């Protein structure tokens, strides 16, 4: 199996895509939040690598091409925002304040937890970009001296959790505003949260797309300040 992956340009990508589609089928069939397609794909890929004794480096060499699609996929989130541009203009102040408070809450909670658990500076800055899209979070972590691979894992886990429990939180907190739902999912759970927002509706999708971009910019600006605190 290692030889097959080594000699193939796309076998790792093929495994990843197939596992993701299995996750989609399970989610449609069982309709349970725990069967998030990305989470299912991650677990299945790990099992395949373990069962066939495939080392990660070999797998990554033929699966890395999927990551090239990350940036254009993120940019494409601007489409639903453009379609709901009138809402942005109408609620501009409230939207910006909401996203800013979300970013500050994320960064401050990481700072407090890092203090509580006595994390090193490297571990602390690794976690700071947890709520923004991977493309930006990896760069922030690298520049601040964090562990980029762990940052990616934390970002993915954050997104999956936001995708899974977002609607539950809305019910518990009696949040009914489409704008508020979209902003919450995009600010806290980046692109994976935005995918959930788009399932809820066009307004939710548009607001989540906006919050991904704005929260990413704010995190780039504020993370440097927070990094100096510890």
Image (cartoon, helix red, strand yellow):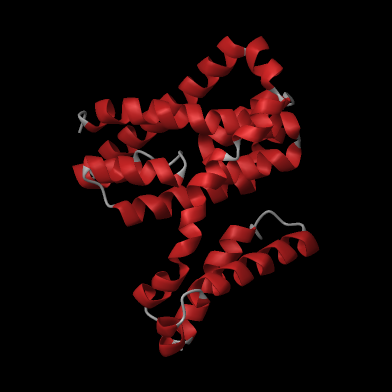
- Vertical comparison of 109 with 100: above or below: below
Name the residue: 50% across, 74% down: 10
Q: Position of residue 82 (x, y in %)?
A: 66, 26
* 146 left or right of 161 in image: left
* 203 left or right of 75 in image: right
Q: Quadrant of residue 126?
A: top left
Quadrant into which the C terminus falls = top left
Q: Quadrant of residue 39?
A: bottom right
Q: Position of residue 127 (x, y in %)?
A: 34, 43
Q: Position of residue 125 (x, y in %)?
A: 27, 41
* 170 left or right of 54 in image: right
Q: Residue furthest right?
A: 29
Name the residue: 70% across, 40% down: 198
User: Does residue 23 appear in this view?
Assistant: yes
User: Which of 173 and 66 lies nearest the eye of the viewer?
Assistant: 66
Name the residue: 71% across, 24% down: 84
Q: How many marks?
A: 0
- Vertical comparison of 38 with 57: above or below: above
Q: Position of residue 47 (x, y in %)?
A: 51, 77
User: Does residue 124 appear in this view?
Assistant: no
Name the residue: 72% across, 28% down: 203
- Vertical comparison of 77 with 55: above or below: above
Q: Quadrant of residue 186?
A: top right
- Vertical comparison of 30 with 192: above or below: below
């Amino acid at each position: 199996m290692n030889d097959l992956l080594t000699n193939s340009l796309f076998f790792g990508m093929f495994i990843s895509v197939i596992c993701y589609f299995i996750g989609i089928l399970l989610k449609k069939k069982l309709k349970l939040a725990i069967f998030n397609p990305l989470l299912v794909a991650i677990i299945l890929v790990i099992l395949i690598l373990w069962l066939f004794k495939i080392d990660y480096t070999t797998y990554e060499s033929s699966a890395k091409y999927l990551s090239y699609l990350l940036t254009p996929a993120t940019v494409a989130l601007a489409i639903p925002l453009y379609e709901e541009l009138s809402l942005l203009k109408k609620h501009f102040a409230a939207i910006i304040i909401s996203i800013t408070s979300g970013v500050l809450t994320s960064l401050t909670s990481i700072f407090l937890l890092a203090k509580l658990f006595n994390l090193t500076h490297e571990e602390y800055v690794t976690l700071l970009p947890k709520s923004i899209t991977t493309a930006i979070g990896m760069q922030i972590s690298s520049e601040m001296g964090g562990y980029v691979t762990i940052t990616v894992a934390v970002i993915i886990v954050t997104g999956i959790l936001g995708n899974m429990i977002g609607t539950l939180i809305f019910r518990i907190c009696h949040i009914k505003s489409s704008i508020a739902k979209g902003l919450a999912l995009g600010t806290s759970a980046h692109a994976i949260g935005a995918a959930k927002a788009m399932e809820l509706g066009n307004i939710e999708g548009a607001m989540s797309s906006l919050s991904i971009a704005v929260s990413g910019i704010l995190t780039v600006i504020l993370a440097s300040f927070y990094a100096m605190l510890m």
